[in-house]
């Protein structure tokens, strides 16, 4: 997972993750730092394997690690985080050695990861959408009753 480890070492990436962690330091609800990103990556990879999708592990992990990277911009100026994430991703991915085709596929998945219709797709977009939603451990959350997620979105049972 050479490319993935390169992402994790990227100074721009590290700075953006640190900024998210700082802005979410007092957030009582689910956070968007590295633990969430790795949960999404692992769940996405399981979904891909179970459905026998032909998507490279490094593409899945790269997508998951970058999908919420723009969260700090959303907190600071209201820009939808998927737009900022997709804007930051190509430079990080290019430096890590991803091909232009992989960068395009990853960026498109990042842009679509909040759209429910994406969850039905049998491709990277669908995998990311599903994994992102399934990564939340609502069944073990101490403040689940105060969460603004609707009951039908909450993960009441462990699936992955």
Image (tube, grey):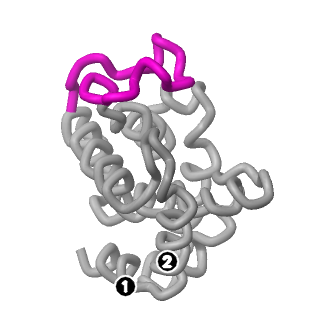
Residue 81 in view: yes
Marks 1 and 2, Cα distance to the nearest angstrom?
A: 8 Å
Prevailing secondary structure of the magenta residues? loop
x%, y% of residue 47? Answer: 27, 37
- Looking at the image, which residue is at 56% across and 32% down? 118
Instruction: Choose between 39 and 57: the one closer to the eye.
Output: 39
Residue 123 in view: no
Left or right: where 8 falls relative to 11? left
Q: Residue furthest front?
A: 26
Vertically, is 97 above or below 159?
below
Q: Image quadrant for the N terminus?
A: bottom left
- Looking at the image, which residue is at 70% across and 62% down? 73
Helix, strand or loop status at disc 1: helix
x%, y% of residue 150? Answer: 53, 16
Please tell me whether residue 144 belongs to the stretch shown in magenta: yes
Left or right: where 95 falls relative to 38? right
Q: Which residues are magenta?
A: 138-160
Q: Image quadrant for the C terminus?
A: top left
Vertically, is 49 above or below 72?
above
x%, y% of residue 76? Answer: 73, 60
The answer to which image quadrant residue 52 occupies is top left
Helix, strand or loop status at disc 2: helix
The residue tagged 1 is 9
Vertically, is 98 above or below 150?
below
The residue tagged 2 is 13
Q: Are marks 1 and 2 in contact (CB under 8 Å)?
A: yes
Instruction: Choose between 157 and 87: the one closer to the eye.
Output: 157
């Amino acid at each position: 997972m050479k490319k993935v480890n390169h992402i994790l070492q990227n100074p721009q990436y590290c700075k953006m993750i640190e900024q998210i962690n700082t802005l979410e330091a007092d957030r009582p609800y689910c956070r968007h730092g590295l633990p969430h990103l790795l949960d999404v990556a692992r769940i996405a990879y399981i979904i891909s394997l179970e459905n026998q999708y032909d998507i490279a592990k490094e593409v899945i992990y790269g997508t998951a690690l970058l999908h919420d990277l723009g969260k700090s911009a959303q907190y600071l100026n209201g820009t939808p985080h998927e737009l900022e994430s997709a804007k930051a991703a190509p430079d990080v991915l290019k430096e890590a050695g991803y091909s232009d085709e992989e960068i395009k596929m990853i960026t498109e998945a990042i842009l679509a990861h909040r759209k429910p219709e994406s969850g039905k797709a049998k491709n990277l977009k669908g995998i990311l959408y599903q994994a992102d939603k399934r990564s939340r451990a609502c069944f073990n959350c101490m403040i689940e009753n105060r969460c603004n997620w609707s009951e039908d979105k909450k993960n009441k049972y462990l699936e992955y």
